Image (cartoon, rainbow, N blue to C red):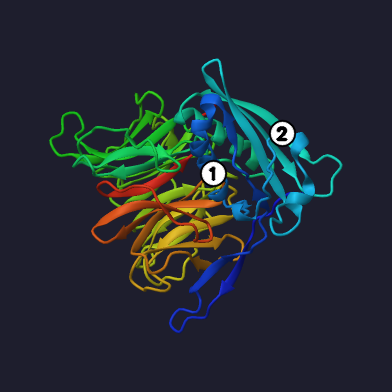
Amino acid sequence: MRRAFLFFSIAFVAGAQQPDISGNVRRQIQVPVIAIPDFRGSGDAQKLMKVFNSALADDLENSGALKIAPKTFYPLNTPQRPEEFRRADWFSPPVSANYVAFGYAAAKDGGLVLFAWLNTTGDSPNANLFGKLYFGSLDEAGAKKVAGEFSTDILEQFGVKSLEGTKIYFVSDRTRSKEIWRMNYDGSNQERVTDLKTITQMPAVSADATMLAYMSLARRRGESVPVYQIFIASTETGRKLPFDDPPAPTSGWPEFLPDGQHLLFASSLTGYTQIYMSNLDGSARRQISVSKALDISPKVNPKNGRDVLFISDRSGKQQLWHMNLDGGDLEMLTNGIGEVANPAWSPDGRMIAFAWTQGFEIGAFNIFVMDVADRRPIQLTKDSGVNENPWWAPDGLHIVYSSRRGESTQIFTMLADGTNVQQLTRQGNNYQPVWANSLPR
């Protein structure tokens, strides 16, 4: 079959004050078009079809990999089974679809059964790409479940990783103390993870999604003054795992290495906050960065496990820097103007996202992305408050971030070209989101 290629073209706009960084990203309209005629159900399944059809369309539309053909263009007779599919009805204008997802649902043995197919409208002897049965409970949760599973299988045909099952961890003050929370990728099922009744922040999740690290203001045994310490816990049970925190006034900004066996973090152990690496239990600790400055927020390239981004003020202002795991190959990636924060690697290790006080709206943080190869920053957010804490989704097509608009800070997602902005949180203030992979099945 034909593969779908989603790519970005950069349209630079020369600004009067900042021509080197002012720009926008425009997504080329070269994504495939898919038609999704409404699924119908027999018996008790019919009352769930509105929920199912909406969930399926939302998943595919928000994936950034497909464009849905308007339903007003669909033919009157839509297929429910492969033998009813007619390529000419969908390939030709006004539908002009490259693919068609269709099927029907039934209630059977007290559950919901979905019969679903994906066909291509291309000139191929075999139009059917796959057909499959999906099973769920006979309620709205079951309808959303089978819709998510079907959309996952569709997206896999285009080499796109589904976000179904992924979680976003974040910091929220909605219970009067700052705690770690998590939610589904679409903002549903928001739940508190920690209950420490103090300031807990900077969450990090291991690549296999089984471990959560964070920094929290707590008293050490025998000491009366609380200090920031690093904690590691299981994401499944909440049980804390052993970690030998450095005896320093401040330790935090944890980051799991891709191997799942080591941790990067920052600590003021020597008087200056520097970057360290240790085993997961805190043993074999060694200093990575060496400067009489503030070095924080280490982030390791998820593809090679060697390149490290970090924030340092060794040049006078907080800027984006790069080094390797040995502390060598030091290089400042931003131009020294303004302040930089919150670096994050894309899953393929080719792009960087960060917050910067440059661009259009000088002085306010906005989200930028940078291709590692050409090192040219592109501004994504504009005229939308103070935007920080970007983090890439596992599919590499979405970014989650925090934005202060008005009186509160909330969490939003967008496609990696700055479009399709969605608000996920609304209670309290919410910060520092990180997008975690799905747990292993």
Can residue 202 be seen here?
A: no
- Residue 297 is situated, as x and y percent measured from the top left of the image, at 39, 51
- Residue 314 is situated, as x and y percent measured from the top left of the image, at 38, 63
Image point (55%, 25%), residue name: 43
2 vs 357: above or below: above
**Left or right side of 223 for 79:** right
Count of numbered marks = 2
Residue 26: assigned label: none
34 vs 141: above or below: below
Can residue 333 be seen here?
A: yes
Tell which residue pokes out farthest to the top in this image.
109
Looking at numbered disc 1 in the image, what kind of residue is underneath it? Answer: Asp
- Which residue is the site of mark 1? 59
**Mark 1, secondary structure of its residue:** helix
Q: Rate crowding at label 2 as few (under 14), some (14 to 19) or many (20 or more) other CA atoms within 10 Å.
A: some
The label nearer to you, 1 versus 2, is: 2
Q: Going from the N terminus, do you reach mark 1 or mark 2 first?
A: 1
Looking at numbered disc 2 in the image, what kind of residue is underneath it? Answer: Arg
Image point (75%, 45%), residue name: 120
Question: In which image quadrant can residue 361 be found?
Answer: bottom left
Q: Quadrant of the C terminus?
A: top right
Question: In which image quadrant can residue 28 be found?
Answer: bottom right
**Left or right side of 174 for 244:** right
- Residue 381 is situated, as x and y percent measured from the top left of the image, at 43, 64
Tell which residue pokes out farthest to the front in this image.
76
Image point (32%, 52%), residue name: 410
Residue 81: assigned label: 2
- Residue 356 is situated, as x and y percent measured from the top left of the image, at 40, 65
Q: Quadrant of the N terminus?
A: top right
Q: Rate crowding at label 1 as few (under 14), some (14 to 19) or many (20 or more) other CA atoms within 10 Å.
A: many
Of residue 268 and residue 205, the one placed in the foreground of this image is: 205
351 vs 216: above or below: below
